[in-house]
Structures are given as C-alpha cells and as structure tokens.
Amino acid sequence: MAGERKGTPGNLTADDWVQAGYALLASDGMRALKIERLCEQVGATRGSFYWHFTDMKGYRAALVASWNAFLEQDRRSLAELEDLPPRERLSGMMRQLLSPQHWTLERAMREWARSDDIAAANVRAADHRVLVAVTKAYVDYGFSPEDAALRGQATFATGIGALHLMDSADALTTADRYERFLDLMLAR
C-alpha cells in the first residue's frame, strides 16, 4: 500500500493502525483522525506511526486501499450468494452486510465520504453494487421491476439506517430481526 514501510517494530502492524483509524472514524468522525488520537487508540508512539506510514497522506491512502480490498472481498462474497434462492440470498446479504466488521467500516467510510471525494466515490460504487444485487433478488422472487426496485431501496436504506442507529456492532447480530424484516419485505 502507498505510504507503508515493510517490516514492523514491536507487535503492531500497518493493519492495526488502519483498523484503529476505522474505529476512530466510526465513533468520532473525521476530525478524530489525527496522529495523536491514533497513537492513543493503539497505545503506541508517533515513532511507531511513522515507522509504518510516511505521513498522514500515506496513512489515508492505506485506509482507502484497505477499504478497496474489503470491497473486493465483499463483491466475491455477494457473487457466491447468486445461486441461492432469492430469500436465502437476501438473508445471506443481510447477515454479511450487517456484520460487526461492516458496522465499523461502513460507519467509518460514510463519515469520511462526507468530506473526501475519493471516499465518496468508493461509497457510491459500493452502494450501487449492493442495491443492484438486492433489487435482483426481489425480481428473482417474483416482484415486478418497479416493486423490486422500491423494496430494494427500502431494504438498502434500512440496512444503512441500522448501521447508524445501533450503538455497537454487537447490536446488529440478531438474525431473528433480519428474518422478520424479510417476512415484511417479501409479503404480497
């Protein structure tokens, strides 16, 4: 990744720093993304930060690269669901997209996207991909394209809302709630 060095002193890795950045973005917003706050978050010194990253620009590039790698894995995971029956596919998408890992990353990247054009473009592309997959599942279930689009948008908006309304990643793990929501969305 851009701005990273090879080799690590101590036990911290560049990914530890990246994950700390996501956590800060998700909980406290873009203003919290400062070297001092990151050092507090991981319990390390500025020297450790500079061992892993040349500067804050390099660090932010590593955040974007990490997000893009996550999105690529996400694309593969969604593709693996394509052969499932529509309800199972929707249920799998909900479990995947409302996972604790998504909670932190989505909140972080959506916060960052409010002030960064590159992050915003990444979020828009990811949103489009998910919305297309969700809408297709509703079409495959038997809804008209118009109804499927409306249900897809409602499902997507509910998922984004859940990510922002829940105060912890653990609150998203109730599978029964997903299934009840799908019952509502699949009712005719």
Image: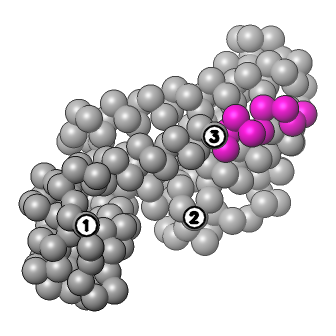
**In the rendering, at what x and y percent does residue 148 appear?**
74, 20
The residue at 10%/80% (across/down) is 47
- Mark 1–mark 3 Cα distance, whole angstroms, equals 28 Å
Q: Farthest front residue?
A: 7
**In the rendering, at what x and y percent does residue 131 appear?**
60, 28
Q: Can residue 33 be seen in this snapshot?
A: no
Labels 3 and 2: the sequence-earlier one: 3
**In the rendering, at what x and y percent does residue 62 appear?**
28, 54
Crowd class of label 2 (few under 14; some 14 to 19; many from 20; radius 10 Å): some
- Give the residue at mark 1: 6
**In the rendering, at what x and y percent does residue 22 appear?**
35, 62
Labels 1 and 3: the sequence-earlier one: 1
- Give the residue at mark 3: 76
Q: Is residue 36 above or below residue 104?
A: below
Quarter of the picture holding the C terminus = top right
Q: Is residue 127 magenta?
A: no
The residue at 38%/52% (across/down) is 66
Labels 2 and 1: the sequence-earlier one: 1
Examine the image and state in which quarter residue 5 appears: bottom left
Q: Is residue 124 above or below residue 169?
A: above
Q: Is residue 135 above or below residue 17?
A: above
**Amino acid on which disc 1 is placed:** Lys
- Mark 2–mark 1 Cα distance, whole angstroms, equals 29 Å
At mark 1, the secondary structure is: loop
